[in-house]
Amino acid sequence: SRLTSNRYHRGGSDRYIPLRPQNVTESTTLSSITASYSNAPNHFSQLNFLGSSHLLPSGKNNSVTTNGIGLVARKALLRNELLNDAIDDARFISCNVNTGPVLDCSNARLFKFGRNMATKPGDLSAGNANRCLFRGPLSDESRRFLISLEKSQRKIPEKPYKILDINLMQDDFYVNLVDWSARNILAVGLDTTVSLLKRDNEQIMLCDLQAEHDFVTSVQWNRMGDLLAVGTERGRTRIWDMRVAKKVHEFFGHASKVGCLAWNASLISSGSQDCLIIHWDIRQPAKSAEQRFNGHSGEVCGLKWSSNGEYLASGGNDNQLLVWNLRKNKPLQVHTKHIAAVRALAWSPHRRGLLVSGGGTADCRLRFWDVLTGQQLQSVLTGSQVCNVAWSRHSCELVSTHGFMDNKVIVWKYPSLEPLAVLKGHERRVLFLAMSPDGESIVTGAGDGTLRFWRIFGQSLQQKVARSKLDLSSSIR
């Protein structure tokens, strides 16, 4: 008949019949799926295909937890499987966490329709048959990403790689006497002098205030590393140009000690014992360069500008954390959850608006804030006075230094807030902290008269830009 003639004959049929090699059994659904993971690295736990567990590194010392980095890992897997992002290294994942479990089997194909496409004779091993029928629930990028999670758990050296004995280092919670420049020069305030330490341990005295009966109370490099701001006991702020090794500006305005400084491009902000914050623009004449913030009722002991220069965070001896911008002379936000002086402040380089603050002896907490919403995200009890804090530039980690009673340095994983390392060695409060220009090392200083250099963060990696199908802004002209 016409319906059965070769002219109208098509390959296959209207029935859905799986085409399998003769020596492969019918049990190819769940058994073949799990079999594809039987040869996976032994540090991964079993993948439950029903979704009650997740493929995450196992082990009691593992920092990948369901409340922390595990959520970030699942977010990365979700982006890979649903949005075809190519995140294949754990060091590229975002610090922002807001996701759920990932199980996607869009690549799985248990049935084939049409002409017989059996494998070649002699190539019908069970492994090859499984690969023919099922390629696994995760993409190659996701598999590489999961393997990199285990590799990312590096060992942090417990001992400093260098120790320098420094005399006249003050044991004062309200001064900031150490900073490391982008040109790899360490500035240290010692009593009436500022010393510059270079890579070869060469020490140069920049200035001496003894003749003026003044003392150095704070030092801060600008972002380029060519200008150094120096705050003094008598309320002065001086700017030194390293290209000519001369003082180029001097600002008067505070009634007492300038204990903290912060740069924002050409603007230098100073916080003082007189409870004021004053901004000076070095491009303008001294008398017209001044702008004042008056919001603290106690000494200003912490001051940090966000990396984009939009927000200024200030901490005080009144236990308050204030957030400002230059458009208003009143604080945008006032946070009062700390119950001790707020000296330790740091803005995340990975997420806009993420701020961490640390409280003194009666508080002992690190608190994380989203200043875009004004909400506290989370907090962790550290067990001792928080003196300083800094974010890693290359990974979702941070380091905090502590005083009473442990005098320790702690490296944290964010957002799990699990301690990756606890470093000890200082005999007094670890008041001073600065990061190397490559972002791999830190230097800590204490009243015990030592500077200790620690290598705690990983090497810099070129950041990958994940192009999402849902990121419409990248395609708008």
Image (spheres, rainbow, N blue to C red):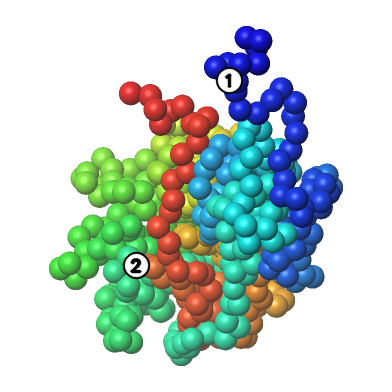
Q: Quadrant of the N terminus?
A: top right
The one of 133 and 229 positioned closer to us in this rendering: 133
Q: Quadrant of residue 111?
A: top right
- Amino acid type at image mark 1: Asn
Element type at marker 1? Answer: helix
Q: Which residue is mark 2?
A: 181
Relative to residue 222, is residue 2 drawn left or right?
right
- Amino acid type at image mark 2: Ser
Q: Position of residue 344 (x, y in %)?
A: 57, 60
Q: Which residue is mark 1?
A: 6
- Examine the rendering and report whether any part of residue 82 can be seen: yes
Relative to residue 106, is residue 186 drawn left or right?
left
The one of 455 and 306 positioned closer to us in this rendering: 455
* Looking at the image, residue 373 lies above or below residue 70: above
Residue furthest to the top: 2
Residue furthest to the front: 1
Q: Position of residue 438 (x, y in %)?
A: 39, 68
Q: Quadrant of residue 299?
A: bottom right
- Examine the rendering and report whether any part of residue 106 can be seen: no
Residue located 71% across and 49% down the image: 21
Q: Which of labels 1 and 2 is toward the front? A: 1
Circle nearer the N terminus (1, 2):
1
Element type at marker 2? Answer: loop
